[in-house]
Amino acid sequence: MSLFSRISEYPITAAARPLRRTPLLVAGLLLVTAAAAALPAVPAFANAPDTTVTVNLAQPGKAPTHAGSGFLYGLSQDGSEPTDSQLQTLDPTLFRGGGARIAGGGWIGDGYTDGSGFQVRLTSALDQARRVTSAPYGATYDLLVSDLFGADTTQPSNTVYPCTNGNCANWTTFIDTVVGSVQSSGIGNIAFDIWNEPDGTGFWPVGFGTTQYFQMWDTAVREIRRLDPSAVIVGPSLSGYNHSQLTQFLTQAKADGTLPNVLNWHFGDDPVADATDAEGIESSLGISPLPLSINEYLFSDQQTSGSTAWWLDRLADSDISSAAHAIWSDCCTTGSLDSVLSGTGSLAAPTGQWWVYRAYAQLSGSMVATSSANADVTAAASENQSQGRAVALIGNDSGQTGTTTIQVNGLSSASWLESGGSVHATLQRIPDQSYLMAPTTVADETLPVVNGSVSIPATFQAGTDAFFLTLSPSDTGGLQPTGASTTAVDGNVTGSTDNEFSYDANWGVTNGVSDMYDGTANWSHTAGATATFQFSGNQVALHAVKDVDQGIMTVSVDGGTPQSVDDYASSRNASSVVWTSPMLATGTHTLTIVNTGQKNPASSGDNIAIDRADVIQAQTIGASWTGTGQDQFGYSSGWGETTGISDLYAGTALWNPTAGATATFTFTGTEAALHAVKDVDQGIMTVSVDGGAPQSVDDYSSVRNGSGIVWASGALASGTHTVTVTVTGTKNASSSGTTIALSSIDIA
């Protein structure tokens, strides 16, 4: 992709942002000030020595606010995407939008009146707000008034900005129209964000702090409050934290009686320090503290697992009440949460950043104190006795590699976490991958508590990693779950062993392809060309080029029925997941890819280009791992437990022959596969997902299989799901019994 095709929604001045950030490209124009051009090149991050972060359970504090769980222009135009299962689990608290870049140009495009260009933007914003402000979300929607006006950096050069030459009449009419429309919609929790980044030339070239700026601001505030005295107004939405500009704004707005209800800005170096400084400005001016918001954070080069976690950690420790993930590449109606999801619609899948937000949403109960020997490696942690766990999210904004020791102190004040002088620790690494089926569990062990403390090393394999630590009592019951992992294998890794591709003579290879994994593509336009991939795991996801010249291939596993996959697409995606296998039994498998020589009628070619394969090792959880939380089995009364059986997972099965007996299992992921005993005395059960139609599963078999897969969910939307098993009390005519015996479940 050409650099000039990348669209940034929010340009900034060089003075407002840290020097290591790359200049933004807006609508094909490189916006670099003369000052920025004169700056020296920024050196690459230096690797820091190993460090320690400390979590102190003896110092509980406020309840988690999930302040950072907001998204700028992350929804589809009508607000329907992403799906609830992909969004609810992130516990979002803030959304921001106003129809930017939707064709028509807004109020400006309609000749400064209420026409179709304005209405299509307003409809989009209200559709989005209607969804996310209602149950189960209850989020706030910051309505970008200036984007409805049309000032989204695509406005014409001859735009007449509000209050030009002191004439605010048309601006007043516009504000009346916007407020009236919001009131008529009946939607609550909408805040009016009057003008985006008025200190950046792309949105408000008139200049910040000018007479015209304050005429525009004061007119809007007074008119909104005249029409709706209870309205929430957000501002000034500066492009970056700026002490002098914020002081100027607050001084003038106080004098004019037009202070906002929420004081906000974008980006900054550290939300803790910036919030403290802003509160100091308010105090010096005699202004009662206002709620603080950063409704645009994360520079383009910070949109990694590690940096996202760092920002979420710092937001959790700050006095910021809300913040929204910035958008750089997907403006403004794709529904991908700005690439927090990889792909859209039916192809939407979690990325490393998505898993970071999911981990952040699991902060509950009370926040606890944290500290770090390296300011760029942070932690946010909470404890929740009712859930029986303490968790910590570890972030990294410095490119740090090496080992960070996570030291947890104060366990003597959280005795409910201890059992027999030990605590169970599960540490997950969240790599920065554009498609990540699940984080990698790097430690899952019982640790002795020494002097009220435990420690566990987190090794950063890349400077963009994040980590999530969960502590729970060591006697939760049953066998500890095995960890899930995802391994990406480039298509150019060849050989005849596990995690290697093999190609016949009809394939070529191209190197240096910037939008492909490791820059390589293995391709063929010959009918019958065959490639194989041997792997050991529970599932495989194949990435291939989708483009205007790609053909149709077939894909099969272990000699099964080939499935046809059409790689044609009207716009290029070089590393798209084009096919995912069902859940497979643990062991070695072979994926076979064949070029059919056929193509979609719309395609200009029949080429097949393989990017990589992701090998998923599912998380396996034994049926005896019981409880009321996630990743645990819950049973109705009457289930028995048998141990010491060699062909069962961990030698254990939970069994019940009684009609109506149930077992449930709740997990977060995209697929599940249930293992149960198949034998001459087994009965029939039903299995359902999320309350859907039950599927009948007959566990009778003339040949015993103690832990085979008897049911698989197939692909599910990313999110939290519940599998329900019900004993029917019926059986196959050949069976001698109605017993159902569960061994384990695989989740990915």
Image (cartoon, rainbow, N blue to C red):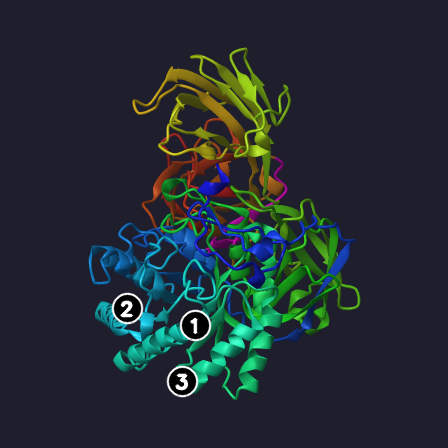
Q: CA distance from mark 2 to mark 1?
A: 21 Å
In the visual, does 324 lie left or right of 36?
left
Q: Main secondary structure of the magenta part?
A: loop
Give the mark toward the camera: 2 or 3. 3
Q: CA distance from mark 3 to mark 1?
A: 15 Å
Where is residue 615 shown, x and y percent of the image?
56, 34
Q: Residue furthest top?
A: 505
Task: Find the magenta span and give its range.
Answer: 630-646
The answer to whether residue 62 is seen in the rendering is no
Name the residue that disc number 2 marks.
Answer: 187
Q: CA distance from mark 2 to mark 3?
A: 29 Å
Q: Find residue 235 and name its label.
A: 1
In the visual, does 156 lie left or right of 199?
left
Name the residue that disc number 3 marks.
Answer: 256
Secondary structure found at label 3: helix
Mark 1 residue crowding within 10 angstroms, few (<14) / some (14–19) / many (20+): many
Where is residue 124 shown, x and y percent of the image?
29, 56
